[in-house]
Amino acid sequence: MEQQASKSAIQLSTESRGKNRRSAVESREELPKARRVVVKVGSSSLTSIENSIDENALRSIVDALGRIKAQGVEVVFVSSGAITAGLQPLGLSKRPKDLATKQAAASVGQGLLISRYTEHFARYDVTVGQVLVTAEDLMRHSQYKNAHRQIERLLDLGILPIVNENDAVATHEIRFGDNDRIAALVAHLIKADALLLLSDVDALYTRPPKDGGERIATVTDPIADLEGVEIGTVGRAGVGSGGMVTKVQAARIAAASGIPALVTSAANIESALAGDDVGTWFATTGGRRNVRLLWLAHLADIKGTLTLDDGAVEAIRGRRSLLAAGVTAVDGTFSAGDPVSMVDAAGTEVGHGLVNYGSDEIPGMLGKRTYELGEEFGEDYARELVHVDNLVNLRPRSARTTLK
C-alpha cells in the first residue's frame, strides 16, 4: 500500500506538468468564440414523472446545439434524465429511493433518451454517440485516459458525444450522485473552452426571487461573491438529484481548472450560446489542473481526518508536505493511499490528501520529527504523512452562505 501511495505521488507530479492553462474565453460575451463547449442539461428540463420525456424541451435543446455544431463548434452534451424517463414505462409514480429500482429505471430511460436524441439530431445531419461513465472512470488514471480518448475520437469523427452517469452499474460507494460534477470533470478532461450548466432556474440569486432576491450576474471569487447567499438544494420539479448547490459546486470545479462556466435555464440556451447577458457567469479562478487533483479536492470518498497544529496548516498552505510533527490527532479508519481530510485546531477543513500510512500506524507517530520516526520505526517511516504532490488546499464555503 505504501508503494501505491508513492507511485501516486510520482504520477500526480508527472501529470501536472503543462496543465496550467486557461480558456481563451474570458467573458460571457465571448462565448460565441468558443470552439469546444460542454453543455449539461438537468432532469427537470428534459423529463417529468407524469410525461416521461418532454419532447418540446428536448427539441429546442437539440435545435440550439445542432445549429452551433453546424458552425464548427465541437459540442459534448451531458444529459441527465435517464431515471425519470424510465419511470412511466415501469409504471412508477415517483422517483424511487432504492438503488436497484433507480438502476432499472435508468436502463430503460437511457435507451429512450438516446433514441430521441438520435432522431432529433438527425435533422441536422448530426450523428450522436453515447458515453456512459462512472466515478471510477474519472478517478483512475487508466480509465480516465480511456474516457478521454473515446470522447476525443468521437469529436475527431464529427460525432456529438452524449455523456451520462452510468446509473445502471453505479453503486452507493462509487458514484457522483449528479451529472453537474461529471460535466465539470468532462470539461476539464477535454480542455473545453466553456461549460454551460442548464436547469429550470435562470440564474443564481442572492435569495429566492419571490423574497426579493437579486440575480448574481458574475462570480469572480466563489467565496467572497457568495457571502450570505441562499443556495437551493433541490430543483422545482423534484426529479433531479442536486439542485442549484451542485451546479455551483460544478461551476467552481470548472472555474478552478481554468474553464469558465455559465449557470442558467435550458430556456435560455440560445441566448447563452449567443453571449447574451443571462444567468450567472463563473469566471476562471485557476489554471488547468490534474484531473486526479480535482477528484481529490471535490469528489474523493474521505476515509478519515488529521488534525493539524498552526505550523502544519501554514506549511500545507505554503505547498509543503505534511509531516507527523504537525499532526495532533487522527480520526477514522483508513489504509495507506486513502484520501483523508486535514483540519485545523478549530475543525475547519484546510485540505485533502492521500496519506502514506494507515490509521493504525499514525497515532504512535504524532508529534515526532522525521528523523525520530526513522530511528524508532525504521527508515521506511522517515518520510512525510502526506506528500505535497498528493495534497490539495481547500477554501471553505463562507459560514454565511446557506443551503436551502
Image: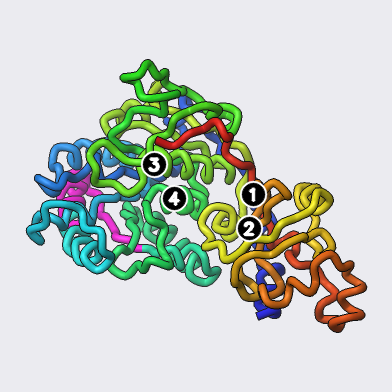
Counting residues from the start of the chain, the first of labels 4 and 1 encountered is 4
Region in magenta = 114-132
Tell which of 174 and 21 is nearer to you.
174
Residue matched to label 4 = 181
Residue matched to label 1 = 349
Q: Dividing the picture into quarters, in which one does residue 283 lie? A: top right
Residue projecting furthest to the bottom: 378
Residue matched to label 2 = 341
Q: Nearer the viewer, mark 4 or mark 2?
A: 2
Q: Nearer the viewer, mark 1 or mark 3?
A: 1
Mark 1 crowd level (few <14, some 14–19, many ≥20, 10 Å Cα): some
Q: Please, is residue 190 above or below residue 276 in the view? A: below
Do the CB atoms of the residues marked 1 and 2 lie less than 8 Å apart? yes
Counting residues from the start of the chain, the first of labels 2 and 3 encountered is 3
Q: Secondary structure at mark 3?
A: loop
Q: Residue 239, percent across and down?
A: 24, 46
Checking the image for residue 73, the label placed there is 3
Mark 2 crowd level (few <14, some 14–19, many ≥20, 10 Å Cα): many
Q: What quarter of the picture does the N terminus occupy?
A: bottom right
Q: Nearer the viewer, mark 2 or mark 3?
A: 2
Q: Residue 3, percent across and down?
A: 70, 80
